Image (cartoon, rainbow, N blue to C red):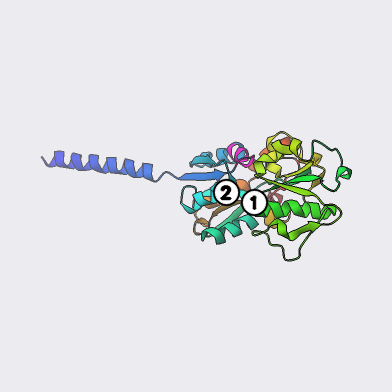
Amino acid sequence: MKKKIFLLILTVVVVLAACGGEDDTDTITVGFGVGTYEEQFREGILPILEEQGYEVEIQVFSQNMQVNPAMAEGAIDASVFQSTAYMEGINDELGIEMTRLAFAPGAPQSLHSVRHDSLDAVEDGSTVALPNDPVNQERAVRILEDLGWVTIADDAGTTDFNLSSVSAADYEVDFQVLDPAQILVSLEDVDFGIINGNYIAEAGMRIADGLAIEDTPEEHRIIVTVLEEDLDEEWAQDLKAAYESAEFEAYITGESKYDGFVLPEAWENN
């Protein structure tokens, strides 16, 4: 009788241990907007994490504005789609504390046209498509300011930027404000469009072929984002190490579509 009881207890312990093993499996859920950053992750980062024993779930959102609320709700653990400036604005808006984990290879914005092959074609009344979110819109208008087409007020914000801060300089251009993902496919409807670089790469085009290219400031470079409370978690540090690894560097530099991307300084140590 005692032997049977012992065997029963042993069986229960084994079953509970097995269940506990399933619960202890490290799963990371990473969110992305539409564009090439998900492909970078799937092809270059995912194999590294899986080799380390992680189970990884990838969620792609149809609109960038959906990603951060998903993190606030706990639906994703990390994201790769936004800049520091955008993240800080959303932190204030949503009352959460996201932080930069690492820099990701990011593409500068660039100005393109299918109607014109030169910047000299601009004139009063030319239409220019801009992203509709404040941070990317501010970036885009800075390109126009560098060209001398517009002037931006000294007190123009970044996360709260709006076109009321913009006035004509050399030209009276008309702005068409669109979702960032729609500008590339809308170029036939405007004279010029300023496009986030990941969409250019995704379309198999070259950033270098743009009529003007952004000199991307650090606050607008693409980052891997996590909640501040997770920054020192082992999975977060492993994710950071993957983005800064020689293996990921070799993948990115071996793909021509990423020519012209701003690369992480951490790779200088590889």
* Residue 205: in magenta span: no
Name the one closer to the observer, 83 or 157: 157
Residue type for callout 1? Asp
Residue type for callout 2? Met
Query: SS of the residue at dot 1?
Result: loop
Q: Quadrant of residue 31?
A: top right
Answer above or below: position of 114 versus 171: above
Q: Residue at x 74, y 48 (%)?
A: 175
User: Is 130 on the left or on the right of 9, as rendered?
Assistant: right
Point out the residue furthest to the right here: 120
Helix, strand or loop: magenta stretch:
helix
Name the one closer to the observer, 235 or 220: 220
Q: Quadrant of residue 160?
A: bottom right
Answer above or below: position of 263 versus 95: above
Disc 2 packing (10 Å; few <14; some 14–19; many ≥20): few
**Does the residue at mark 1 contact the one at mark 2 (Cβ under 8 Å)?**
yes
> What residue does disc 1 label?
133
Q: Residue 231 in the image: x percent, y percent?
A: 53, 57
Point out the residue furthest to the front here: 125
Q: Would residue 59 be visible to someone looking at this image?
A: yes
Query: SS of the residue at dot 2?
Result: helix
Extent of the magenta region? 34-42
Name the one closer to the observer, 145 or 46: 145
Q: Residue at x 75, y 53 (%)?
A: 141
User: Is 31 on the left or on the right of 4, as rendered?
Assistant: right
Q: Residue at x 87, y 42 (%)?
A: 121
Labelled disc at residue 65: 2
Counting residues from the N terminus, which is met first, the one under dot 1 or under dot 2? 2
